[in-house]
Image (tube, rainbow, N blue to C red):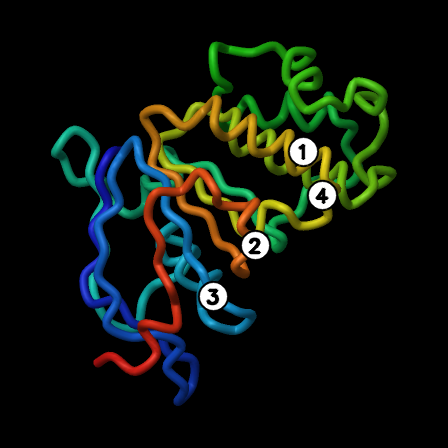
Amino acid sequence: MNHIILENIAKRYAREWIFRGLSIEFLSNRAYVILGSNGSGKSTLLQIVSSFLTPTKGTIKYFADQQEVPIEKVYQYMSIATPYLELPEEFTLMEVLAFHRKLKPFYSDYSNQKMVDIMELNHAKDKKISNFSSGMKQRVKLGLAILSKTDLLLIDEPSSNLDANAIEWFQKLIKAYKKDRIIVICSNHIKVEYAFCEHEIVMEDFKKKT
């Protein structure tokens, strides 16, 4: 997937419009950030881009090599890390990696041990996820999403639960795996989360458009 077109997208819950009149094109080899305060609709927009949510108005089209991708197949091209997507708590890290690779291949067919090394979690590879700290779980989520060989990478609030060292780890990792991808980040204006992004979408700009 190398091209996504959103035209006049709007989302409403009950009688309240979350945002309206949003049109944008996402292109491969570029990184975008969706900026907004809590409740601004940035996570909602990310879910629309992921195909998890349907917009109230407007259209969204996905293309791979100039061929339109059916919406039911978008998941095949995508990896995502968000606060609302949970890890299987009863699995060890090694089991999570083994399970994940059945769904999505990793870059360069990395071994599970290589993945653990990149995540810097070798000391915890045989522990159950339920015993991980919130910061360790976030490393796993980010590692799984970034290191999956996907064309579309979506991340909501990447620095959530990360300390300064882990934020630096995230920045280095995503810069190393940016090529040939559409990257979309959601952020509450936390610069360390999106310093590498070339394009900004400010949700407050789409609150009153029709």
Q: Which x, y percent locates residue 153?
A: 43, 38
Q: Mark 1 or mark 4, which has the lower sequence index? A: 1
- Residue pictured at 47% horizontal, 10% vertical: 108
First in sequence, mark 1 or 2: give its number: 1
Q: In which quarter of the image is residue 178?
A: top left
Q: Mark 2 points at which residue?
A: 190
Q: Determine the residue located farthest toward the bottom in the rendered image.
A: 15
Amino acid bearing label 1: Val
- What's the CA distance linking mark 4 and mark 2? 13 Å
- Between 162 and 92, the one nearer to me in the picture: 162
- The answer to which of marks 3 and 1 sits earlier in the sequence is 3
Q: Which quarter shows the C terminus?
A: bottom left
- Image point (37%, 37%), residue name: 152
3 on left or right of 185: left
| Left or right, residue 109 beside residue 210 | right
Query: Mark 3 — residue?
Result: 36
Earlier sequence position, callout 2 versus callout 3:
3
Element type where label 1 sits in the image: helix
Q: Residue 162 carries which label?
A: 4
Q: Tell which tag, 1 or 4, sits nearer the viewer.
A: 4
* Mark 2 or 3: the one toward you: 2
Mark 3 vs mark 4: which is more N-terminal? Answer: 3
What is the distance, in whole Å, between disc 3 and disc 1 at their CAs? 25 Å
- Dot placed on the residue nearer the N-terminal end, 4 or 2: 4
Residue under circle 1? 140
Q: Position of residue 92 (x, y in %)?
A: 79, 28
Asked which quadrant contains residue 181, the reply is top left
Helix, strand, or loop for circle 4?
loop
- As measured in the structure, the alpha-carbon distance from the residue carrying label 1 to the one carrying label 2 is 21 Å
16, above or below 150, in the image? below
